[in-house]
Amino acid sequence: MNADALRVASVGHTGRMVIDAVQLLGRSMSWELIDEVAVRGDVGHPQGLCRWGDGWLVSTVHPGSGTGEVFVVAADGEVVSRVDVTDGERFHPGGFAFDSTGIKADAPLPDCWIAVAEYRPRSTTTVMRLDADLATLESFPFDDHLGAICPLGDGTLFAVSWASRRWYRLDTNGKILEQRTTPSRWVDLQDICHVEGGIDGVRVVATGVGELRTPGGPVQLGGLVAIDVDAMTIVHDTPIAAWMPSGRVATYNGAHLDLRADSSVTLHCLVDDIAASIGTWVANTSMA
């Protein structure tokens, strides 16, 4: 996927279609696992997943060594590059998205923003902007654990704290422009997938996980949430009943959404630790 295709997928007609399609999904929909690509290398504890050229960009934490990194996975699963993003006590990179406003005609890939936090809630974060080579272009400190971050079309950033308990809108120096406690009563957001900027405001789609306590023990459900960032509110949410063969829910951590040629919603996920596959799921909207 070249720079022009990425621009269309992130801010053009396709981006609007993805969000609009998500808002049509309901709790009765079924999901079918249609593909798995084994990642050939240690994936650590994955946190974020984003389309990156013809492959994928992944953020992950290695708790044992106290390090965090982003790495590039080719379409066939080969890990082609790794970049350490550890900043002292901050080694937990979270969910992320590329910067559609930063796509340049002469650059093969866009910039991306990523938050690298201490591995505990209510801690500190270093927010970084990385270029197409994953070199750090700029950074700023933030006084909370940011678990996911997403650049918006107007040059600001939308971010959520550990388990998305707090929502923030920031400028690119880290100044808080707006904040609130989460309005969600069931899902903890883990990754932020797509962005749309337009006359109707700014919407993002986030994925996450919620846990239900049952007589048989806790059950985890995935979740999709469409957010109006201008209003700082949820405009649509729905559970996802989809689990990887390992038993881990499909939106446990890193996830990415796009559309197939028939306009069905496709969910890509990387959620298992150490040895894992990128799973691709398609929504059966006839059941929604």
Image (tube, rainbow, N blue to C red):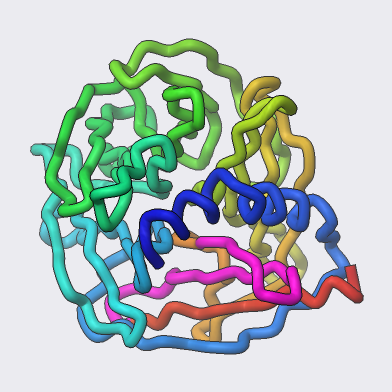
Q: Residue drawn at (54%, 55%), measured in percent from left and top?
A: 9
Q: Residue drawn at (85%, 60%), measured in percent from left and top?
A: 26
Q: Is residue 9 magenta?
A: no
Q: Nearer the viewer, residue 168 or 13?
A: 13
Residue 17 rendering spot, x and y as whole percentages: 71, 54
Q: Residue drawn at (70%, 30%), measured in percent from left and top?
A: 183
Boundaries of the magenta span: 256-275
Q: Residue drawn at (31%, 47%), measured in percent from left and top?
A: 105
Q: Nearer the viewer, residue 211 or 193?
A: 193
Residue 181 rendering spot, x and y as whole percentages: 60, 23
Mark yes or no: residue 190 visible: no
In the displayed structure image, the side of residue 153 where residue 139 appears, left or right:
left
Q: Nearer the viewer, residue 221 or 50?
A: 50
- Quadrant (top left, top right, bottom left, bottom right) of the N terminus: bottom left
Residue 72 rendering spot, x and y as whole percentages: 25, 67
Query: Residue 54 sits in which quadrant?
Result: bottom left
**Residue 167 vertical placement versus 113 (above, below):** above
- Quadrant (top left, top right, bottom left, bottom right) of the C terminus: bottom right
Residue 87 rendering spot, x and y as whole percentages: 12, 39
